[in-house]
Image (spheres, helix red, strand yellow):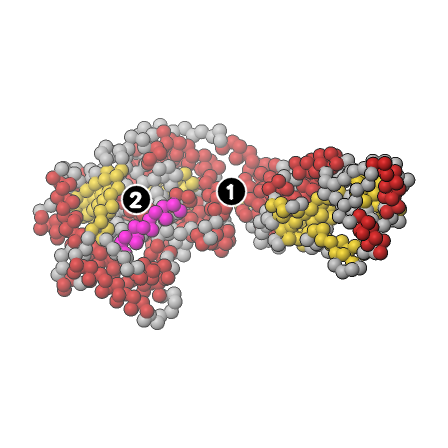
Amino acid sequence: STDKWLLVKESDVQWKIVEITDSIKQIARILGKQLEVPLQAKEQLLQVIQSLAGVITIQSAMTGAINVEQVSPDLRLHVHLWPYDSGLKCQIRVQPLGEDSAFYEPGVGAPSVIATVAKKTLQTQRDLNTELQTLQHLTRACPILTIAEKVHDQYAILDAEDCLTLLLQLQEWQASEQKLVIAWPEGEKMKVTRLIDAKKMQLTIKHDQNWFEARGEIQIDHDHVMQLKELLALVKNSPGRFIALGNNAFMALTDSFYQRLQEFAHYADASKGDKATRIHALAATALETLATDAGQLTVDQAWRDQLTRLSQLDNYTAELPSTLQADLRDYQLEGYQWLSRLAHWGVGACLADDMGLGKTIQALALLLARGAKGPALVIAPTSVCTNWQSEAARFAPTLNVLLFGTGNREKSLKKLKALDLVIVSYGLFQQEAALFAQTHWHTLILDEAQSIKNAQTKRAQAVLTLNSDFRLIMTGTPLENHLGELWSLFRFINPGMLGSLEQFNQRYALPIERDKDTAARNRLRKLVHPFMLRRTKNKVLTELPPRIEILLSVDLSAEETALYEALRQTALANIANITVDANKKPLQILAEIMKLRRACCHPDLVAPELALPGSKLAVFGELVEDLLSNNHKALVFSQFVGYLAIIRQYLDAKGIRYQYLDGATPMKDRKKRVDAFQAGEADLFLISLKAGGTGLNLTAADYVIHMDPWWNPAVEDQASDRAHRMGQARTVTIYRLVAKHTIEESIVHLHAHKRDLADSLLVGSDLATKMSASDMLALLQDENG
């Protein structure tokens, strides 16, 4: 301020300039800090007030007649808004004498106001109670104000979504009550449309092969119509229901309309050049919810047929074939009905029940039900083919089973008829893929379907050439490595549903695996859920005995510890000297890690010339001696065939009976050895983890010993389920032997994190293929690992 001017701050963006005239100075000298006037001088004081009103604005609690124009108070609230930090500030005022007059805080101050406005002296009596009531009504209509930070008489709203919500609430109250004026600093105004819901949308849906095309328009205001495709693009990238239109303008969508648009946008394909947005027929429920509320809807017959089929599915019930020679458990009957519904719908299915729940018998029931309409094909690992053959003979004897491979292969496939079931291994199928592609299969089943998890392999490419009416994949571990495997599996059963691999990675794989995006994970789960059925043993087999898991830590000897540390330091040095291209570096690191893991198992696997005894083998021997003395039988798993050879030598020396199985065991011998173990002809069954993790029923064992931890706990669980499955009457105890202060402990620590992700979306993660070079290097650099 100066002697001539006074600058008064009324808000962060509003200042009042007061000219200090000689008259004002004189009034100030007369009034001083306080002027007391006798009661008898009231009339004279009123006359003075009247004469001063042309110079200053006067607030007074005194009543009395003054010879100035009396006006009714303007009771509207004025909300002053201005940008602040990342949001807004606002101040609520009243302006009793109207435009160009002074502002006051609602309900605060003297009731009488006298001022000169537009060269006219006016007086009004403020209704302080009504001002406060109106403010209360506004606060109730704008609940954002109740949670905003308030300093003195200013509200601070920092969240962008809250700011836009406040604007919308203010505008709605202004339109309904007409007791509000919204003011902005010049050039800073934000605009929000009235709430827009699905009723303002015109939608057209028509069929296009495996897709439905949606075209539409949304009436934003009287002069602005937006295409649905344009709106979907904006919605997909918007953090909330307020859609930025540019120039500080926003479109406000109702919560329900925004959610449905967002869901549709994430499932839809907008890559076509015209105004249409496509969605796969199997994901069309996202479009159905949007279409239900459209103000104007035009659809073709294919869309009507789609809705009819979906509505009928819930009531569809299939008869259980009378030729099935088995009594299905309740959950197995539910599985059969679920498979039948999807086959009736004409879509593919993934039966992902836990290991040991009888996926095969559920599939055999379906094969019997569908058998009369044409031949069926089952592709399975070599180790599982004989199991299919024996299970079919036992439970579905009316099926004509052909184990493909002997005789004239081409001729055998040309003579197929109803109720014929061809069983072939993945390896043999890949050799004869062109031959199998010439037959139209009524039912096509891939067992242990993780065999096609890598979409780039010839095997995964070959199964896509097959022609069939219904496709079923079966696997207890739908995903072992990464989300790309899910895409590969669904590309087979429901082609196009998850989009191209590039689209899938952008929409789901990268957000879920890299960014831990829960929303993306939920969208993917919702999309695949109708076509995937998974039950776990602990939920459906209440009679299954308990499963106890024990981590047995093994102290390495001083010599083994020195050997391990020397190998670790050498590994770090070797990696530091790697000069190959970046793509090969992870493989080099992995090779060094494998050497360390072998050292944890037994010194002979890395340095046989030292002839050091193995501490883990000694602990294993003590454990086996204790088990056998109490009449228990055990399955012994290792991923290293060389380690199993060492264990065999140990058992031979001790005279302990065992059966043995690895990837080199012929298929006919596998069944003989399994039957021998089940018949009691051995106390231990030594099995390589990969070769024996599937297709084996070994319930004669009630103990499982994992000699070394595998990257993926799901693979270990699958191996353990050879004993913990239907038919097991005893508690199954699982031992994991882990060398202390080694990389094995680091692997076990990672298991918990991997199980969390697997439980959320049935996703395992094989660190040997998914960890980055830096992640793997960190395992080597850990002195305790």
Marks 1/2: CA–CA distance: 31 Å
Element type where label 1 sits in the image: helix
What residue would you read off at disc 2?
718
Residue sitting nearer the eye, 289 or 432? 289
Give the residue at x 81% y 47%.
57
Q: Position of residue 570 (x, y in %)?
A: 26, 67
Q: Quadrant of the N terminus?
A: bottom right
| Disc marking residue 177 | none
Identify whether 772 is placed above or below 624. below
Element type where label 2 sits in the image: helix
- Circle 2: residue type: Gln
Residue sitting nearer the eye, 198 or 468? 198
The first of marks 1 and 2 along the sequence is 1
Give the residue at x 49% y 31%.
314
Residue sitting nearer the eye, 699 or 161? 161
Furthest residue toward right? 67
Q: Would you say 496 lies left or right of 391 here? A: right
Q: Is residue 509 visible?
A: no
Residue 19 is drawn in which quadrant?
Answer: bottom right
Q: Main secondary structure of the magenta part?
A: helix
Q: Quadrant of the C terminus?
A: bottom left
Q: Nearer the viewer, mark 1 or mark 2?
A: 2
Give the residue at x 42% y 48%.
486
- Circle 1: residue type: Leu
What residue would you read off at disc 1?
282
Q: Residues within 10 Å of mark 2 (few under 14, many from 20)?
A: many
Residue 559 is drawn in which quadrant?
Answer: bottom left
Q: Identify the magenta region.
A: 743-757
Q: Position of residue 503 (x, y in %)?
A: 51, 53
